[in-house]
Amino acid sequence: MRASKYHINTLKEAPAEAEVASHQLMTRAGMIRKAAGGIYTYMPLGLKVLRKIENIVRQEMNSAGAIELLMPVVQPAELWVESGRWEQYGAELLRIKDRHQRDFVLQPTSEEVITDIARNEIHSWRQLPVNFYHIQTKFRDERRPRFGLMRGREFTMKDAYSFDRNEEAAQASYDAMFAAYMNIFQRLGLEFRAVAADTGSIGGSRSHEFQVIADTGEDLIVYNPDSQYAANIELAQAPCLIAQRGAPAEPLVKTPTPDAQKCEAVAELLQRPLADTVKSIVLATEPAEEGGQAALWLLLLRGDHELNEVKVGKLRGLDQGYRFATDDEIMRGFGCVPGYLGPIAPLEPIVIIADTTVANMSDFICGANTEGFHYTGVNWGRDLPEPQVADLRNVVAGDPDPQGGQLAIQRGIEVGHVFFLGDKYSKALQATFLETDGKPALMQMGCYGIGISRIAAAAIEQNHDDKGIIWPKAIAPFQAVICPMGFYKSETVRNAAESLYRQLQEQGVDVMLDDRDTRPGVMFADWELIGVPLRITVGDRGLKEGMIEFQQRRAGESANIPVEQALSHAL
Ligand code: ATP
Ligand code: MG
Ligand code: MG
Ligand code: MG
């Protein structure tokens, strides 16, 4: 590709609303342009990255035996009514009507459509197992679309769905996908962790998330550096942490769902000694969403925390003397607590009570008692039993042994999620097949998502510096860029640059030749911002000595390489 024939439009400034590096840098590098909140055009450079991610995902899915198809973005409401999710999904599901007033949804995932396909296409045990996947546009009307591609409303996901004869076979399909995901994220060149996870609105009984490690991640992972134990803190609730710390096993608050009872429980909690150690109290409610229940949040923060524009709200039993937080404060809630990102022990006392039917946050409490710290949790608004240490052992691969060693916390960006669904959807939609004995049986399912567009953003969160993006080689928009100094002035430079460009292309290297005739400083700044891993500078001065300059974007060091070795050095 020649830069003069491509579209490159870098910006000095990021939009004011861009809070995180990936949003700022993707916009500045000209990879995305906003069309509306959470809805972006993937510009040519950005699309190239997405295609490379897709290709890796596609290759690994294919080699794990999954079969690609393509399901529609617009899906009939009838199927969603059948599964029950038309009612359950809440405001994140974008519902639309056609000209005949018939209801449709823009797909947030495709369990319904694929289960409908399965019940119509699969009749015999001979057709199983099968695993279908597609890479398709998703739409979720996120409450807070933000951070650019990290949390879009329209985004690209790879979602796969496995169908099996029985639970044992379905577990094997799940394991195969788990292994494929490990390969995918290794090939993408990202630092990641597979963690035991909650199943959210997809449902099902067992799941793992793949988390890219980055300070800007919205999820909290608790893990044991000395074992394979790792879990999203949504799941790593009290029992595990208590076992770890040897603190009392009794939760501070335990209450059924209704709001009034929650309020009473919180009011009771506030009267406990814990409250004495706390300077700021932030209470907040969120309107009913996903699960149809209002959430109640409570953050008790010790120390000096700058919380602006605090509004006073009314919540029965809790409207005296406490402040109600704004949305922004809630989102910053975790960030407000010093030490929270470190290992568990130095945590400030903090109480967080959230309803996970609304927020993808944990319903857990970490508190301080007089002997020091302990951590305990509540589980509100869900039918799920609280996970026990034994359960955690079951869901985490290998030997987690949460008793041994100290647990640590990291922030992560959820880039992939695998679920064991069992017969949740096959039962609702009656997806059966005939077993060897001629009797109908329900198919056992699993579903497996990967956020293609989110991966691009997560890669940047993990790999950038003050100059711009540092793409892992596998997903960089270009592997190398040739920067000629005086392309139109010096025939020697032009010939050397053109020759290397041609040779690299012949070798299959995705290379850019910057023939725009811009000043070197501008040219270099552009490619550092865009994040191309290798820069090859061709200039008269070097050529006189038979040399070409190579610079790795990440290390930043440059080396002069003899012209005749340039090709092999670039490969
Ligand atoms: P989150 O917890 O971030 O809201 P999720 O748990 O709702 O994500 P899943 O239903 O598990 O997401 O979807 C599978 C994958 O799709 C996620 O692991 C993530 O990589 C991606 N994804 C989900 N929501 C978004 C979004 N709003 N923008 C970009 N990617 C997303
Ligand atoms: Mg999640
Ligand atoms: Mg979500
Ligand atoms: Mg998820």
Image (spheres, rainbow, N blue to C red):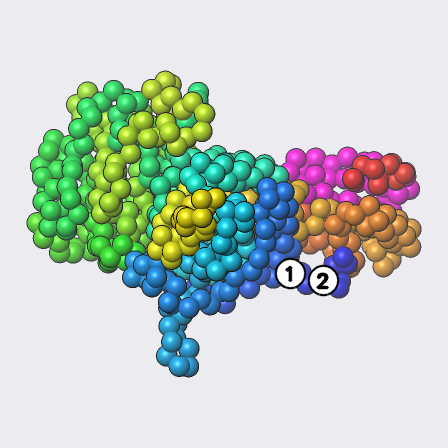
Label 2: which secondary element = loop
Q: Mark 2 points at which residue?
A: 6
Query: What is the CA distance from the residue labelled 1 to the residue labelled 2?
Result: 8 Å
Chain part drawn in magenta: 533-561
Q: Residue 44 carries which label?
A: 1
Query: Percent x, y for residue 469?
Result: 59, 46
Q: In this view, does 298 lie to the left or right of 399?
A: left
Q: As displayed, is residue 349 above or below residue 263?
A: above
Position of the C terminus, as image quadrant, is: top right
Residue 559 in magenta? yes
Circles 1 and 2, Cβ within 8 Å, touching? The answer is yes
Q: Where is residue 119 in the image (x, y as percent from the top left)?
A: 45, 57
Please state which of residues 245 and 80 is positioned toward the viewer in this rendering: 80
Residue at the image position 33 percent from the left and 30 percent from the top? 391
The answer to whether one can see residue 540 in this image is: yes
- The residue lying toward the viewer, choosing from 81 and 320, is 81
Q: Which residue is drawn at 48% across and 44% down?
A: 436
Asked if residue 445 can be seen in this view, the reply is no
Determine whether, in the image, residue 312 is placed left or right of residue 3: left
